[in-house]
């Protein structure tokens, strides 16, 4: 299999040379190797080495413990970019969520504990040799996501692999190899045992990277349906939005699910993400009319950031930008007043003018905002004070 040498960045070569110079066999593995073979540039080469984490730490001046229990040490280069260096490992025990690993393994053993054949190809950065004991090359050619070894066991060891397999299939436009897919479906109830964070992380990564949204949703629903995580995902897969799909996981979750804020809450998304989803879902999805007054009223209610999300949601659903978008842009660019803070009078101005404190004041302010939303040229102190008297 004549494969051209991979373009390994000098910083990665330096790390590999230092490890090899000290007598520790070191290989490039994982996503970046796979991506290069698929023609996608990816400079984030992970290194796998026979050196133990302590030995790695001794060899390099600046290191970070990124996952020491799994044998991963981060080595910082001169630009303070972090490179992951992981000791060859064997699994000692697994419980579907966490593995206990042992060092002192061979490259072959290390590759055997990886999830899919396309992720288990090693490349020697100095000798330009390849190790591909599970025919990852063949599966790249056949466009297949295939588990390393017996799929049932591999998913039972770590149920997250089910979601990873779906993510890679959707991202590369690959099929899941039939036995791998059958095992994934059979193991799917085990997804219930994963942490919300890991499920969310996979969901967001999948949304960011999928080449086709309908395909992702189809696969994701198939494995997720027996579990508690995402009952809100729509039954019907979406049409492909065609045009550039925004790689925005929160917006896409609103697009793809009923009650998206509940879903994100269950997945322990951040408060900001949950609130944003709730605001988009609450709407109203569009202004009541196409005239500036209707658009300003709507903007005033939903706020400009949510309005932008609602416009993007409309585009996702219909394949074209909403008719009101240009007018909305003009309104925002002009800076038409759309909230109380933009009024030419404040609450204390109104108190000074003799409007009584309490609910009446709130009513007057709301009335003034309506008055200005109808016609922004009314937003002067003089006009508003006069109007306030009329309203009170
Ligand atoms: P990407 O970073 O583009 O999502 P990747 O393949 O690099 O894809 P990582 O999560 O960065 O994925 O993991 C690096 C490598 O570690 C993988 O290619 C795979 O060999 C191995 N790996 C990661 N997670 C698992 C897992 N849950 N089970 C087995 N092997 C795994
Ligand atoms: Mg990676």
Image (cartoon, rainbow, N blue to C red):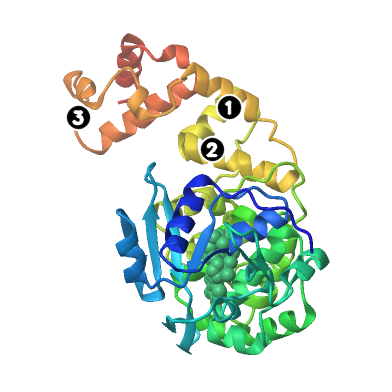
Location of residue 289 (image quadrant):
top right
Residue drawn 49% across the image and 85% down it: 91
- Closest to the camera, between mark 1 and mark 3, is 1
Residue appearing at x 66%, y 43% in the figure? 314
Q: Which mark is residue 356?
A: 3
Q: Quadrant of the C terminus?
A: top left
Mark 1 or 2 closer to N-term? 2
Q: Which residue is mark 2?
A: 307
Residue nearest the viewer, comparing 202 with 379: 202
Which tag is nearer the camera, tag 2 or tag 3? 2
Name the residue tied to disc 1: 328
- The residue under the point 74% across, 65% down is 236
What's the distance in space between the residues labelled 2 and 3, CA to CA?
34 Å
Report the disc number at residue 22.
none
Q: Residues within 10 Å of mark 3 (few under 14, many from 20)?
A: few
Q: Let me know if residue 121 appears in the view.
A: yes
Do callouts 1 and 2 mark residues in contact (Cβ within 8 Å)? yes
Residue neighbourhood size for the residue with mark 2, other residues' Cα within 10 Å, grouped as few (<14), some (14–19), many (≥20): many
Residue situated in front as seen by the camera: 250 or 377: 250
Q: CA distance from mark 1 to mark 3?
A: 36 Å
SS state under label 2:
helix
Would you say residue 258 is visible in this rendering?
Answer: no
In the rendered image, residue 237, in percent from the top left (x then y), is placed at 74, 63
Q: In this rendering, would 266 be left or right of 111?
A: left
Q: Position of residue 156 (x, y in %)?
A: 57, 87
Percent from the top left, x then y, of residue 364? 32, 29
Q: Quadrant of ligand 2?
A: bottom right
Secondary structure beneath label 1: helix
Q: CA distance from mark 1 to mark 2?
A: 9 Å
Rendered location of residue 6, percent (x, y): 65, 52
């Amino acid at each position: 299999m004549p494969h051209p040498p991979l373009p390994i960045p000098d910083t990665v070569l330096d790390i590999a040379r230092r490890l090899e110079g000290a007598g520790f066999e070191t290989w490039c593995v994982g996503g970046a190797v796979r991506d290069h073979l698929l023609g996608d540039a990816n400079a984030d080469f992970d290194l796998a080495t026979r050196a133990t984490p302590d030995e790695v730490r001794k060899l390099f001046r600046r290191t970070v413990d990124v996952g020491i229990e799994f044998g991963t040490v981060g080595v910082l280069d001169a630009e303070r970019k972090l490179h992951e260096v992981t000791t060859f490992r064997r699994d000692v025990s697994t419980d579907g969520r966490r593995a206990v690993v042992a060092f002192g393994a061979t490259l072959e053993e290390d590759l055997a504990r990886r999830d899919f054949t396309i992720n288990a190809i090693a490349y020697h950065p100095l000798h330009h040799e390849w190790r591909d004991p599970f025919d990852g090359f063949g599966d790249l050619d056949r466009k297949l996501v295939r588990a390393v070894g017996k799929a049932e066991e591999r998913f039972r060891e770590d149920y997250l692999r089910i979601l990873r397999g779906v993510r890679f299939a959707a991202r590369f436009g690959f099929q899941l190899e039939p036995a791998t897919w059958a095992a994934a479906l059979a193991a799917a109830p085990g997804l219930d045992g994963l942490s919300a964070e890991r499920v969310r992380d996979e969901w967001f990564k999948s949304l960011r990277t999928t080449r086709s949204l309908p395909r992702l949703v189809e696969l994701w629903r198939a494995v997720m349906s027996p579990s508690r995580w995402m009952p809100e995902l729509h039954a019907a897969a979406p049409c492909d939005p065609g045009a550039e799909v925004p790689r925005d996981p929160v917006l896409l979750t609103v697009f793809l699910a009923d009650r998206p804020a509940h879903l994100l809450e269950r997945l322990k998304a951040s408060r900001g993400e949950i609130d944003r989803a709730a605001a988009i879902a609450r709407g109203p999805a569009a202004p009541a009319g196409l005239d500036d007054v209707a658009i300003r009223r709507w903007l005033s209610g939903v706020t400009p950031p949510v309005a932008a999300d609602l416009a993007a949601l409309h585009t996702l659903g219909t394949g074209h930008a909403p008719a009101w978008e240009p007018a909305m842009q003009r309104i925002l660019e002009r800076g038409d007043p759309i909230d109380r803070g933009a009024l030419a009078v404040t609450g204390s101005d109104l108190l000074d003018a003799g409007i009584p404190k309490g609910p009446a004041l709130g009513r007057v302010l709301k009335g003034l905002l309506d008055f200005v939303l109808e016609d922004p040229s009314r937003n002067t102190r003089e006009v508003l004070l006069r109007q306030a008297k009329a309203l009170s």
